[in-house]
Image (tube, helix red, strand yellow):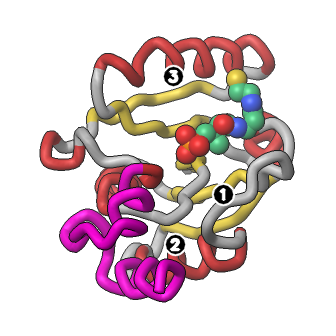
Amino acid sequence: MAKVVCPGSFDPVTNGHLDIIERAARLFDEVVVAVLVNENKRGLFSIEERLQMLDQATEHLPNVSTGSFKGLLVDFCTDNGIAAIVKGLRAVTDFDYELQMAQMNGSLTDVDTMFIPTTPEYSFLASSLVKEVAKHGGDVSGLVPGFVLERLAEKYA
Ligand code: PNS
């Protein structure tokens, strides 16, 4: 049984994240979407809100579950019997940092990292940009699920 994790901040989940999660769910038996609890960074959405949106966005995927973690991702993997980390690569600019993290994680444990190239239509997409555009009244429909659009509108009302 191959169990993998899709980690991230997911503040909030975007269609780019869902592209990677859906493709991981087709490739692996079990996918855990894990939200980092970062005590040094206050997000727009609380961890509970992010998890609730992720649950809603992945409810059509029976082999996907959600959770949160503090500290090292590799410890979360070891504690939960997770063999590999799955990350999306949007562009070559992601690669340097992602490779560095993959190699550091690999040096700490035998947890491996697998990269899935982002579908080109989402290659520019990032939660931070979605928030910036939404904050200033720009149209982010098509970039996030409809219910996330509503939550963004509520936050920036
Ligand atoms: O969505 P993000 O913010 O790009 O996700 C980054 C994340 C959460 C995957 C990364 O920061 C992470 O794994 N943090 C956990 C702390 C950790 O394990 N650090 C060592 C990595 S080498």
Question: Regarding ligand 1, which quadrant of the image does it lie in?
Answer: top right
Report x, y in % for residue 137. Answer: 31, 72
Q: Which residue is mark 1?
A: 35
| Residue depicted at 54% across the width and 27% down the height | 113
The residue type indicated by label 2 comes to Leu
Cα separation between marks 3 and 1: 17 Å
Q: Which residues are magenta?
A: 129-157
Q: Which residue is mark 2?
A: 54
The residue type indicated by label 1 comes to Val
Q: Quadrant of the rendered structure where residue 118 is?
A: top left
| Residue depicted at 80% across the width and 40% down the height | 78
Q: Secondary structure at mark 2?
A: helix
- Pick whichever of labels 3 and 1 is earlier in the sequence: 1
Report x, y in % for residue 9. Answer: 60, 52
Cα separation between marks 3 and 2: 23 Å
Q: Which residue is mark 3?
A: 98
For the residue with label 3, is its CB less than 8 Å from the closest atom of ligand 1?
Answer: no
Report x, y in % for residue 95. Answer: 41, 18
Q: Quadrant of the rendered structure where residue 124 is?
A: top left
From the viewer's perspective, is 96 left or right of 147?
right
Q: Is disc 1 in contact with disc 2, using a CB cutoff of under 8 Å? A: yes
Q: Is disc 3 in contact with disc 2, using a CB cutoff of under 8 Å? A: no
Q: Secondary structure at mark 1?
A: strand
